[in-house]
Amino acid sequence: MTELERQKAEIEHLKQQSKVKQVAFSASLLEGGYGYTGPFNVQITLVFRRVITNIGNAYNPQTGIFIAPVRGAYHFEWHLHGHAYKSHPIAGVLFRNGEHIFLAFELQASGTVSTSCGTSLLLEPGDQVSLRLWAHARIFDGVNHDTNFSGHLLFTV
């Protein structure tokens, strides 16, 4: 292999590596229209169908699961919206590989209500992150796409 061929191969390899390091997604719950999700007697994985950004295709809009492609520090945020109802909170919990990480929760008797949360996690390749609707909770999404879930790779480790 000539020096020029070696350099071209290395450049191509570096391009491929940089693509894997570009990971970001943002999605809202409903594709269109408006409606409630919940309440259910158990937690359910929320599937955010209206994908705005999915660089790296690590978020699956069919399952609602984000799968880390590389080892690194990732940041996730979720914002939930609803209409208050005294027996149904607005609540969603972030899970990593089936482990409860953080809960965003709000309960009030009347009016509109929102809650949000964010966290940074060290993930290994193949780790799964998802957002679940808290048991007995009810959330709303509409044309303003108030209920949404986002995440991105901060840096590789």
Image: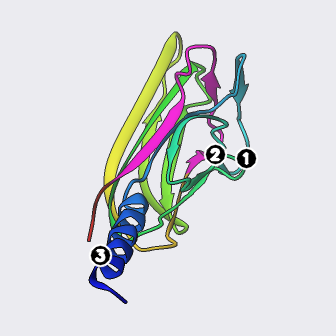
In the image, taking residue 74 as reference, residue 111 lies left or right, namely: right
Question: Magenta residues?
Answer: 131-153
Q: Where is residue 42 in the image (x, y as percent from the top left)?
A: 70, 51
Q: How far apart are the two marked residues, 2 and 1, measured between alpha carbons?
A: 5 Å
Q: In which quarter of the image is the N terminus?
A: bottom left
Q: Which of marks 1 and 3 is nearer the N terminus?
A: 3
Task: Provide the residue designation for mark 1.
Answer: 41
In-front residue for pair 43/130: 130
Residue type of the residue flagged with mark 3: Gln
Q: Which mark is residue 7?
A: 3
Q: Position of residue 145 (x, y in %)?
A: 56, 21
Marks 2 & 1, CB-CB < 8 Å contact: yes
37 in relation to 47, above or below? above
Residue type of the residue flagged with mark 2: Ala
Q: Which mark is residue 135?
A: 2
The extreme bottom residue here reads: 1
